[in-house]
Amino acid sequence: MIRFENVTKRYRGTSKPALSSVDFEVQRGEFVFLVGASGSGKSSCLRLILREDVPTSGRVAVLGRDLRALANRKVPYFRRHIGSVFQDFRLLPSKTVYQNVAFTLQVTGSSRGFIQQAVPEALALVGLDGKQKRMPHELSGGEQQRVAIARALVNRPQVLLADEPTGNLDPATSVDIMQLLARINAGGTTVLMATHEAGFVDQMQRRVIELRDGEMVRDEVHGGYGDTSNIPRLVPEEVRGAAAAAALTAVQEVQRQTADLSVVRAALAEELSTQRKAAASAAPTVDRDGETVIPPAPRTVEPPEPARSPEPDAANVVEPPAVVEPPAPIRPRTHPITLPTVDVAELGVADRLGLSDEDDEEVGPTS
Ligand code: ADP
Ligand code: MG
């Protein structure tokens, strides 16, 4: 889905390359952290993926396209398959939340009907329904980043690139955003997130690609279990108070949740299939909010084990854990689970997030 082949990037007027012989491949549906100190080349990588820049040597292929061979006039179409979010949110300050999310669709010529459906769905997905009319300055930092994420997702991109998306946020809010990105990934969107917060990432059990001075020094499938002795840990000594403890609890909960992502995705796909079958065989009913109500699917599995994440609630945390233990390794589940946290409204959104069978094709021929 994203492939770097021996990529070197040298900026004009600099002696050292920003990227040296970088080689990796990201598969569809993966969640990958791109970590490294400031200046290590993370943003340069993301710019190459977006075709905002081209390598000095080597090859970058994204969604089956060799970006070197991609004509300039095709770049805007290519980018519609890639959502991106940044540390500084980049919202339009004079537009409302709704208008910020709708804007890209408007300029790319989406129909009014599509916009009216897609924007509220994207805002619901990021937990911002009800704030459509707010201006960006009336929102917290975390909420502004949620708007940016809704905007990035509204066009159903196959890939979400996030460049230090938590860089301007406090630890508890950062965890909320991480949970949201994990959930988006569970819906099938490939996520590549650049961050310099290595300690935080090391607790997430996701693939980690580390850059140091433009060179790839690590690529670990479950991340964070190599030598972490010199990586700062997210412990209460560093981020004091109950909020930090709540953040830790939430990080560990994200780990547990995301261990089951394949199960979650399969369950979502099953729900969608049931939804389609139900739509084909019976007229859907409409509830009083105007939402289409799908009759519950017959279940062939055991009642669900609750897999809800507790909201990080600083007030309820009495005893912060003294030390963060590395989480237990992921083991295969010994009992089936279903998806208790997914409601019908969310299923509508799942379709937009790349779970749809119809949207499986690549942008162009694989090269
Ligand atoms: P990171 O995102 O990890 O902080 P960057 O990719 O932004 O790293 O930068 C990698 C290196 O490339 C740094 O040394 C930076 O100064 C240099 N660099 C980035 N962009 C440019 C540019 N447009 N012109 C010259 N040097 C650049
Ligand atoms: Mg950067």
Image (cartoon, rainbow, N blue to C red):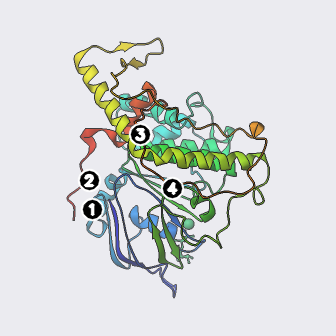
- SS of the residue under disc 2: loop
Classify 10 Å Cα crowding around label 2: few (below 14), some (14-19), many (20 and above). Answer: some
The image quadrant where one finds the N terminus is bottom left
Relative depth, front residue between 360 and 303: 303
- Residue 92 is at least partly visible in this image: no
Alpha carbon distance from label 2 to label 1: 7 Å
* Numbered disc in front, either 4 or 1: 4
Q: If you read the primary sequence from the N terminus, does the residue marked by circle 2 or circle 4 appear first?
A: 4
Q: Is residue 33 left or right of residue 317?
A: left
Disc marking residue 329: 4
Residue shown at 61% from the left, 70% from the top: 228
What amino acid type is highlighted by mark number 4?
Pro
- Work out whether 55 lies above or below 343: below
Q: Is residue 72 left or right of residue 302?
A: left
- Image coords of residue 125 (percent x, y): 49, 35
The residue wearing badge 1 is 65
* Numbered disc in front, either 4 or 3: 4
- SS of the residue under disc 3: helix
- Image coords of residue 79 (percent x, y): 37, 54
Alpha carbon distance from label 2 to label 4: 36 Å
Q: Are marks 4 and 1 in contact (CB under 8 Å)?
A: no
Task: Give residue 114's quadrant in the image.
Answer: top left
Disc marking residue 264: 3
The residue wearing badge 2 is 363
Classify 10 Å Cα crowding around label 4: few (below 14), some (14-19), many (20 and above). Answer: few
Residue shown at 33% from the left, 40% from the top: 355
- Image coords of residue 157 (percent x, y): 38, 47
Q: If you read the primary sequence from the N terminus, does the residue marked by circle 4 or circle 1 appear first?
A: 1
